[in-house]
Image (cartoon, rainbow, N blue to C red):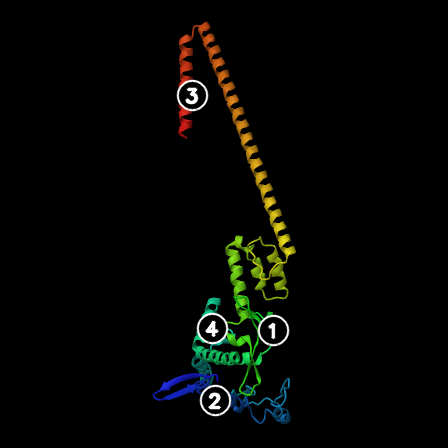
Amino acid sequence: PVIGEEVHIGDRIVRHGIVRFAKDPQRLYNYWRTTAAESIALAPKAPWLLTPTMIEGQKAAWEAANRGNPPYLLYTPDSSAPGGPSRQQPPLPPTAMWSEATIAAEDMKATTGIYDASLGARGNETSGRAILARQQEGDTSTFVYIDNLSRAIRRAGEILIDLIPKIYDTDRVVRILGEDETEDFVRLNAPVPQDDGTVVEMTVLTDSKGNPVYKPPLDFGKYDVAIVTGPSYSTKRMEASDSLMAFAQAVPAAGAVIADLIAKNMDWPGAEQIAERLRKTLPPGLADDEEELTPEQMAMRQQAAQQQQMAMQVQLANAQAEIAKAQASAAKDAASVGKTQAETEGQRIENAQQALQLAMQNGQMQAAIEQIVQQQVMQILGQMTNMQQ
C-alpha cells in the first residue's frame, strides 16, 4: 500500500492524505462562490422611474423592454417630471464575497504546499530561478507521499526478484528497457563457466516424490532493489541539454568535444543519429565505443589516425621551414643595414676630410677643428641617448 502521512499520537497512529486538511478551505471556497452566484442571479434588474403619462400609448413596448433589446423607447413628455424616464441602479453584491473566495483558494495552496508554480501555472515569480525555488518548496511539502510511493515500489520489486527465478526457470532471452526507453536483450539461465574450466548447467533435483525440480542459475545469486526518486528522464535530458549549451558558450573550445553529447540530449527526432555522426568525427581516444569494433572498423580507425598524424607532421615541417626562411631573411636584412651604416660612416669621414682640407686652404683651420669636434660630441651624445632608450 501507498500510505500517506503518519502522525504518532500516544499509542495511536493517525494517517491522512494530502487533501485531508484542504477540505475546509475547499468548502469555504465553494460556499462563497455559490453565494456570489446567488447574489448576482437574485439581484433585481435595473427598474425605470417614470410617470403614467410618459408611457401612455407605449405601455406594451415598455413592458417588453427587459425581454428584448429595443434600439429605442418612446415616451410622452410630462410637465411634472421634466427630466424624462430615469433608471435606478440596483445595489452591487458585497465585495467581501470575492475576497473570501480568494483567501480560501490561497488557504488550499498553503495547506497542501502546492502552489501555482508546482502546477505549471503562472505565479508571481518572474525569473527562472524563482520558479524553480517555488517548485522545490512544493516538492519538499509533499515529499512524504513520494517517499512512501518509492517504498511501495521497492516492496513490489522485492516481490518480483523473489518470483523471477521461479518463473524464468529455463534458458531464454528476455528484453530489458533502459531508463531512456532503449531496448537490450539478455540471456538468462545460460550455462555458467567456472574458474576451473567447468560449466554449471541447470541442475536437476528431485523432490520427496521423485519429481524433477529444476534449480536455475538465477537462484545462485543475490539481488536487491534500489529506488531513486527524482525528475523523469525527459526532464533530466532537457536540463542536461541547457547546461551543456551554457557550458559550450562559456568554454567555446569544449563545444567541439561535447557536440555529440549536446545533440544526444536534444528533444527532437533524429537527435540520436546526429549524435552518432558527430561522435565519429571525434579524434581517437575521446570516444570510447560502447560496442566492440570489427577488424575492418579498427583498421579504418587506425588508418585515419595515421593519416591525421602524417598531416600534423607535414604541417609541423612546413612551419619549421617558414621559421627558417624568416630567420634567413632577418639575417640578410641585418647585413644590408650594417653595410648601409658603414657606407654612411665612410661618406661622413670623407666629407670631414674634404672640409678640413678646404679650411686649411682658406686659413680657417681652428674653426674647422672646432666644428668637427662639436659634431663628434653630438654624435656620441646621440648614441648614448639611443642606448638609454
Q: Which mark is residue 4?
A: none
| Quadrant (top left, top right, bottom left, bottom right) of the C terminus | top left
As helix, strand or loop, the secondary structure at mark 1 comes to strand
The residue identified by callout 3 is: 379
Q: Is residue 154 visible?
A: yes
Q: Give the x, y percent position of residue 5.
A: 42, 83
The residue lying at 42 percent from left, 24 percent from top is 383
Look at label 3 and name its amino acid: Gln
Q: Which mark is residue 135?
A: 4
Along the line of sight, the residue nearer the viewer: 54 or 358: 358
Residue highlighted by disc 2 = 31
Q: Helix, strand or loop at disc 2?
A: helix
Residue at which label 1 appears: 175
Circle 2: residue type: Tyr
Of the numbered discs 1 and 4, the one sitting upstream in the chain is 4
Q: Residue furthest right?
A: 296
CA separation in Å, label 4 and label 3: 82 Å
